Amino acid sequence: MADQDSREGKRYQTPQIIKYVNDTHAGHDSALAQAFAVPEGIPAIQVGPSEGKLLYLLMKLVGAKQVVEVGTLVGYSAIHMARALPKDGHLHSVEFDPKHAEVARKNIERAGLADRITVHVGAGVDVLPTLDGKGPFDAVFIDADKINYDKYGAWATEHLRKGGLVLGDNAYLFGELVDDSDRGRAMRAFHEHVAKTCDSVCIPTPDGLVVGIKR
Ligand code: SAH
Ligand code: DHB
Ligand code: MG
């Protein structure tokens, strides 16, 4: 069957089913629950539980040791990824908003991962060049300002090892991917750059997740 999301008008991904599979495969312990509960005043725009678990599994699959994230929020995806790293592995996570970074550091501390995650405060375009020397990286997860995905994607493939992963959340750009807009053009440039430099796919999560393996 070509289309696997519905049959005779019946949608397969009901809220009850999503809850069941999240509970069964991607349940929260107290550290993940804490980081998922974004405080008031900060937008709850973290990845979903199954995407978080997928990030963890992908880190395990590539044997990730050195990882970069752009867009920490309060550390939910960072905790998932860092849990897949060995003791001597490290996640560098970049966050523009100092308020988000402060909450993230508390959540990371509570998760017992303070030695495995560094939250760098600043804009991705400014902080990423300061990480050049710490590479090559095993994975780069991009989940920050969408207008700069083309730049983040170019930095990622330049600093990934062969076989390393580039990941991009919100790859459907909230439904605006093929729009005639600056953000649309930037996100399409990201897709096309990853497709050119990696073996890649866009997984149909609610808002699309690009996965590329650097060639
Ligand atoms: N990855 C997180 C969610 C990130 S939400 C998770 O799944 O748990 C996007 C984050 O990117 C927000 O916290 C926002 O403040 C941050 N952000 C926005 N512009 C940025 C920039 N230019 N550089 C770095 N981070 C940025
Ligand atoms: C927004 C950002 C995200 O990374 C996301 O997954 C959802 C929403 C936002 O900026 O609104
Ligand atoms: Mg996102």
Image (cartoon, rainbow, N blue to C red):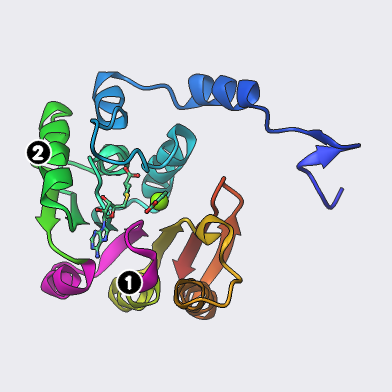
Mark 1 surroundings: few (<14), some (14-19) or many (≥20) residues within 10 A? many
Whether residue 206 appears in magenta in the rendering, the answer is no
Q: In this image, 185 relative to 161: left or right? A: right
Residue positioned 25% across, 25% down in the render: 34
Residue 180: quarter of image? bottom right
Q: In this image, 103 relative to 63: left or right? A: left
Residue positioned 26% across, 19% down in the render: 30
Q: Earlier in the sequence, mark 1 or mark 2?
A: 2
Which x, y percent locates residue 130? 11, 72
Name the kind of residue labelled 1 in the image. Tyr
Q: In this image, 105 relative to 162: left or right? A: left
Q: Is 18 rendered above or below residue 71?
A: above
Residue positioned 78% across, 44% down in the render: 4
> CB of residue at label 2: within 8 Å of ligand 1?
no
Element carrying mark 1: helix
Q: Is 125 rendered above or below residue 55?
A: below
Mark 2 surroundings: few (<14), some (14-19) or many (≥20) residues within 10 A? some
**Residue 194 seen in the figure:** yes
Which x, y percent locates residue 81? 31, 43
Residue most extreme to the front: 41
Q: Which residues are magenta?
A: 124-148
Residue holding disc 1: 152
Name the kind of residue labelled 2 in the image. Ala
Q: Is 48 rendered above or below residue 212?
A: above
Q: Are marks 1 and 2 in contact (CB under 8 Å)?
A: no
Q: In this image, 151 relative to 42: left or right? A: right
Element carrying mark 2: loop
Distance from label 1 to label 2 (Cα)?
25 Å
Residue holding disc 2: 114
Residue most extreme to the right: 8
Residue 150: quarter of image? bottom left
